[in-house]
């Protein structure tokens, strides 16, 4: 059976590797934009500023765009850092793809490796509470979390958060903590008994797809502080690493530069080909396969599915149930760090996490804690409720203790949130239309969780800074899911528990489209584990 996979984000290469391990020939179709190599890999964030031949161009961009303050509203609303110019290729648009937006502004990637070429690597397993609406439980997924952890390297510890984050096999030793995270965790440990009596919230290490020690040809984390711009050692996992592993196998063919438009359908109702549009122009191409795998992210996989129905039946249908996590950013000040010098030589992303249980266990609220160790500070300075000069002075004093809590809230499938095609203009391809409205109970859930977290952080000696909490706009979490859900019941526009489409028997869907519920935990580790699980069952 020849397997044709579309997309090289986190999900696609995991399926490909599993299929290759079982001796199946695999072709991967991808738009696959790529960026420049990481410059001067031996330098740290600080030394790179001096030794890079064009530090302004590298850190701020040729037009100094990186020096702009992110907008206070819209998609960038209230952000505390910008994605750097070295990651521009991740968000380069692919020409035929157009969006009509109503209520959710997504990030979409056509890069080789997808969105996770610039993710922050949070890798959290779902537990049985998170999986209550899935057609399988944690025990079914656990071997696949372990398999993915072995392949990509997931660091963490079985600590107070293990109650929410199961300690799967192959969890590697955690990366050394930055000074502020270390101080905060020490304080939590010292006061654990009191904190655990007074608060429902728990704190511990976050889980990262990043290596504390070398794995294969990847180096361990050297604490160079360059995570945001691109990891020079390969310690921070990106899907292009697994793609590289696939490319070593002679049964694997990678076909970048092709935008997948739709499938063609045979008289028996099965798919018999994929039509692509070459990104550099030219005639449409047809690619044959026996099993077809959609792994190009919820929005693009759904768009290909919708266009297939549109070209086959001249029908425009709706895929209901679109989900995304609401996120709240709450900057805090770790008072124990005041007066201590800033050390930018550290891992840059979240190293600690919080868990806040709710009456309904599936509504658990998940938090990631990131210290502002390196990176541009001007967006934060601008958002302090002070004039620029005093804000800059104060920032220098307190910078080593500044951090941000990123709270994530669950979402559930509602038919009123959907994806469809919008043929309202005469372009060759109809646009993908997104319609989304938040849950009615959202404000109460956020208010309740923030109240709990303000008290918890105050008792931790790290008060949340008044007036700086930001509600991120829908789409910012980049956790889109739910439009072709796995279900036991056979219904149109669903897939079986093994990801097999109920509409086309030789189509499998392995990305976020298939999630029947979206817990608060970042979903990508589960996307990879589920893709591996599906591959183990069908190939
Ligand atoms: C800044 C940032 C931080 C993040 N941090 C985290 C985190 O800490 N933890 C976490 O769990 N998640 C995080 N995410 C989200 C994570 O990146 C996504 O969940 C994940 O990348 C989705 O994987 P995917 O396989 O569905 O595909 P995507 O990453 O969306 O990749 C899509 C792939 O399909 C290809 N493709 C798309 N359409 C077509 C087409 N029509 N034809 C051909 N090829 C196509 C693209 O080229 C690409 O290779 C973050 C995202 C961002 C942007
Ligand atoms: S993970 Fe971050 S800190 Fe560690 S080596 Fe890579 S870029 Fe440097």
Image: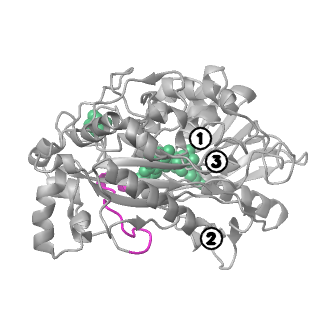
The dominant secondary structure in magenta is loop
Residue found 32% across the figure and 54% down from its top: 458
Give residue 411's quadrant in the image: bottom right
84 inside magenta stretch: yes
Task: Identify the residue position indicated by label 3 in the image.
Answer: 362
Q: Split into 4 quadrants, where in the image is the C terminus? A: top right
The disc placed on residue 437 is 2
Ligand 2 - quadrant of the structure image: top left
Q: Position of residue 527 (x, y in %)?
A: 59, 40
Q: Split into 4 quadrants, where in the image is the N terminus? A: top right
> Mark 3 or mark 1, which is nearer the start of the sequence?
3
Mark 3 crowdedness (10 Å alpha carbons): few <14, some 14-19, many ≥20: many
Residue found 32% across the figure and 30% down from its top: 175
Viewer-nearest of discs 2 and 1? 2
Task: Identify the residue position indicated by label 1 in the image.
Answer: 527
Task: Pick the residue in front: 42 or 261.
Answer: 42
The magenta segment: 73-89
Task: Pick the residue in front: 381 or 128.
Answer: 128
Does 440 appear above or below 512?
below
Separation (CA) of disc 2 from disc 1: 24 Å
Secondary structure type for disc 2: loop
Q: Is mark 1 within 8 Å of ligand 1?
A: yes
Q: Position of residue 526 (x, y in %)?
A: 58, 38
């Amino acid at each position: 059976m020849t397997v044709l996979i579309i997309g090289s984000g986190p999900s696609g290469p995991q399926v490909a590797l599993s299929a290759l391990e079982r001796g199946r020939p695999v072709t991967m179709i991808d738009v696959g934009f790529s960026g420049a190599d990481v410059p001067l890999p031996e330098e740290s964030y600080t030394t790179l500023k001096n030794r890079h031949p064009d530090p302004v161009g590298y850190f701020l961009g040729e037009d100094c765009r990186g020096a702009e303050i992110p907008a206070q509203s819209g998609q960038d609303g209230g952000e505390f850092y910008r994605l750097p110019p070295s990651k521009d290729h991740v968000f380069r648009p692919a020409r035929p793809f157009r969006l009509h937006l109503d209520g959710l502004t997504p990030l979409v990637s056509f890069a080789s490796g997808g969105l996770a070429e610039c993710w922050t690597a949070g890798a959290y397993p779902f537990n049985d509470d998170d999986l209550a609406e899935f057609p399988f439980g944690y025990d079914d997924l656990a071997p696949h979390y372990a398999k993915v952890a072995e392949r990509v390297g997931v660091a963490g510890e079985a600590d107070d958060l293990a109650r929410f984050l199961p300690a799967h096999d192959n969890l590697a030793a955690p990366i050394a903590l930055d000074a502020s995270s270390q101080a905060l965790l020490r304080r939590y440990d010292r006061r654990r008994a009191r904190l655990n009596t007074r608060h429902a919230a728990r704190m511990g290490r976050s889980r990262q797809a990043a290596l504390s020690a070398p794995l294969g040809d990847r180096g361990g984390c050297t604490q160079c502080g360059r995570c945001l711009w691109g990891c020079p050692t390969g310690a921070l996992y990106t899907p292009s690493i697994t793609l590289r592993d696939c490319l070593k196998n002679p049964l694997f063919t990678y076909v970048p530069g092709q935008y997948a438009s739709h499938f063609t359908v045979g008289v028996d109702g099965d798919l018999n080909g994929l039509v692509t549009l070459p990104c550099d122009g030219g005639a449409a191409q047809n690619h044959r396969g026996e099993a077809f795998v959609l792994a190009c992210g919820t929005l693009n996989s759904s768009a290909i599915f919708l266009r297939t129905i549109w070209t086959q039946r001249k029908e425009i249908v709706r895929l209901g149930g679109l989900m995304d996590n609401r996120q709240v950013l709450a900057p805090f000040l770790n008072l124990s760090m005041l007066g201590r010098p800033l050390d930018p030589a550290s891992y840059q992303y979240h190293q600690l996490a919080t868990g806040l249980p709710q009456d309904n266990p599936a509504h658990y609220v998940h938090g990631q804690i990131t210290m502002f160790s390196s990176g541009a500070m001007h967006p934060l300075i601008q958002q302090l409720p002070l004039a620029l000069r005093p804000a800059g002075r104060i920032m220098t004093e307190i910078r080593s203790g500044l951090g941000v809590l990123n709270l994530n809230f669950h979402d559930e499938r509602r038919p009123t949130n959907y994806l469809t095609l919008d043929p309202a203009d005469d372009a060759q391809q109809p646009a993908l239309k997104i319609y989304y409205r938040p849950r009615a109970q959202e404000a109460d859930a956020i208010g309740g969780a923030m109240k709990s977290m303000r008290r918890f952080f105050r008792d931790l000696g790290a008060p949340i800074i008044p007036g700086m909490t930001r509600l991120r706009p829908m789409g910012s979490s980049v956790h889109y899911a739910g439009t072709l859900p796995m279900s036991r019941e056979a219904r149109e526009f669903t897939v079986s528990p093994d990801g097999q489409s109920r509409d086309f028997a030789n189509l499998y869907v392995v990305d976020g489209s298939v999630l029947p519920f979206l817990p608060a935990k970042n979903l990508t580790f589960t996307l990879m584990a589920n893709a591996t699980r599906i591959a183990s069952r069908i190939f």
